[in-house]
Amino acid sequence: MSVHPTSSSTEASLPIANAQPFILQGSERFGVTGNIQPVYYPADQSTQIGACHCAEALHVELIERAAEQGFQSFRKSKPAQRADILWKLANLLEAHQEQLAVLITRESGKPIKLSRNETERAIQICRGYAAETERLNHPLYQMDGREGRIGRFPLGPVVAITPYNFPLNLVVHKLAPAIAAGCSITVKPAPKTPLTALFLGRLAIEAGYDAISVIPTSNEVAEALAKSDAFAKLSFTGSAAVGWHLKSVAGKKSVTLELGGNAALIVEDLSEPVEEIARRAAFGAFAFSGQICISVQRLLMNERIKDAFLPAFVTATRALKVGDPMKPETDMGPMISIDDLQRTRLLIKDALKGGANVVYGGNTYNALTMNPTILDRTTTDMPVNAEEVFAPIVTVATYGSFEEALALVNQSKYGLQAGVYTSDFTQAEQAYHTLDVGGVIINDIPTYRADLLPYGGIKDSGTGREGVLAGIDEYSYMKTLVRKTF
């Protein structure tokens, strides 16, 4: 296997002498029989950048007990105390921003400029939840000689399972509402990116939140936690197959699933300069090698603008910098694993066998990195259209009427987000009311996520919502008080 060249090899290969312990209810400890999980730099798959202790089946009862003890203690906290923890956590994230960004890149292979953006978003998410927590109140209603009050109360211990592609943000999107609502949380991070979650856990403890466990572990132990009656809430972000399976075994607990998609971008007209739309579309399709659940996977162009837009899109794709993820100019680095690169090659091969054509790319940059790939002449039933590719592949197609484009988007079994470029306000409203997705992004790419607003999908893309304006609701329940007034 060839080694990915990097001018930052010393910076990307700082070994950690001792494996990091997992975090259990605000303290760091590990079982004497715990196994060690090494973490490798995806850009060469050989440089070990750290290691951590992983919980085993024998630790499940200990984890359950810690979650319950943490909840019984933290549930008594006041909103002002929770907000203070979130403000402090945001400040700690800011103080360690560059250290976290480098760690994210070392663990996931994400280009450093995207890792820096991720850390900035995490800070703003915590501040958003802090402000929202300060606004929590129990509204009063007067009626027929009675007074009614409505309050929100924490659901209970939360188990959160997170993927590798946003090892900080997708944990923060679960941690912050758990703090805001008054819950304890047990985080099971992705096996390839546990160190960022452990770093975040230590910062949460420093901020004053002791009701946290961060448990790197196997999928088998994670499923046992998802099944466990000790937890009142399961929040999962990952593949549709795994997410729906976990929901099926989760019992009576509340479940939030943030799953995959095959997001479409409709370019109805050139509502902005063609070069700008093409640049955004290329970013949405290929940032972090397409390993984002709202990456642009299906690009639909009105046939009137194809001759102007498609060449501009190819040019924008060609301009992307592929290579060393530690370089600030890099747009695309390695895929998370060799298996994922091979899976991507097979997807392209399968499409070509079915009659598709490579417009651009279709090959590997090196043994660990794909080049961005544009395919046309695909059919709707090909996996590159029908499934979530989670890879740097985008399919392009044309349509006649706007209604036809909307129908093509809705053919998917997924329904996460869609983007629409149009200068027609009526069409924008039509898309919003017609598209079967959780979010419609007008005059931008579906890859844009507004962390403040509710985010999530329908159909195979999941259930429930994250985001500052929805997250606390997902981790709490409403309780009504009615009493006579004399």
Image (cartoon, rainbow, N blue to C red):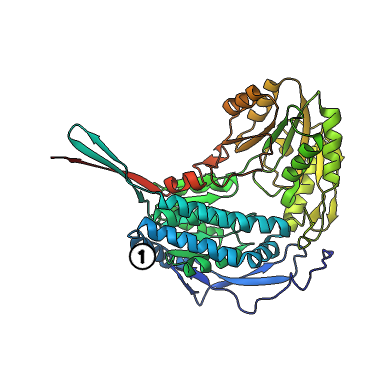
Residue 368 rendering spot, x and y as whole percentages:
79, 58
Q: Secondary structure at mark 1?
A: helix
Residue 405 rendering spot, x and y as whole percentages:
70, 25
Closer to the camera in the image, 106 or 424? 424
Quarter of the image holding residue 20? bottom right
- Which residue lies under the disc numbered 1? 69
Whether residue 432 is situated above or below residue 255 in the rendered picture: above
Residue occupying the point 74% across, 69% down: 12
Q: Looking at the image, can residue 162 be seen?
A: no
Residue occupying the point 68% across, 24% down: 424
* In-image side of 231 versus 257 (left or right): left
Residue occupying the point 73% across, 27% down: 268
- How packed is label 1: few (under 14 Cα within 10 Å), some, or many (20 or more)? some
Quarter of the image holding residue 82? bottom left
Residue 14 rendering spot, x and y as whole percentages:
71, 74
Q: Quadrant of the N terminus?
A: bottom right
Residue occupying the point 64% across, 56% down: 118
Residue at the extreme left: 486
Quarter of the image holding residue 409? top right
Whether residue 23 is situated above or below residue 84 in the rendered picture: below
Whether residue 65 is situated above or below residue 329 in the rendered picture: below
Closer to the camera in the image, 436 or 431? 431
* In-image side of 301 versus 145 (left or right): right
* In-image side of 222 versus 381 (left or right): left
Closer to the camera in the image, 423 or 301? 423
Dot 1 amino acid type: Gln
Residue 204 rendering spot, x and y as whole percentages:
49, 65
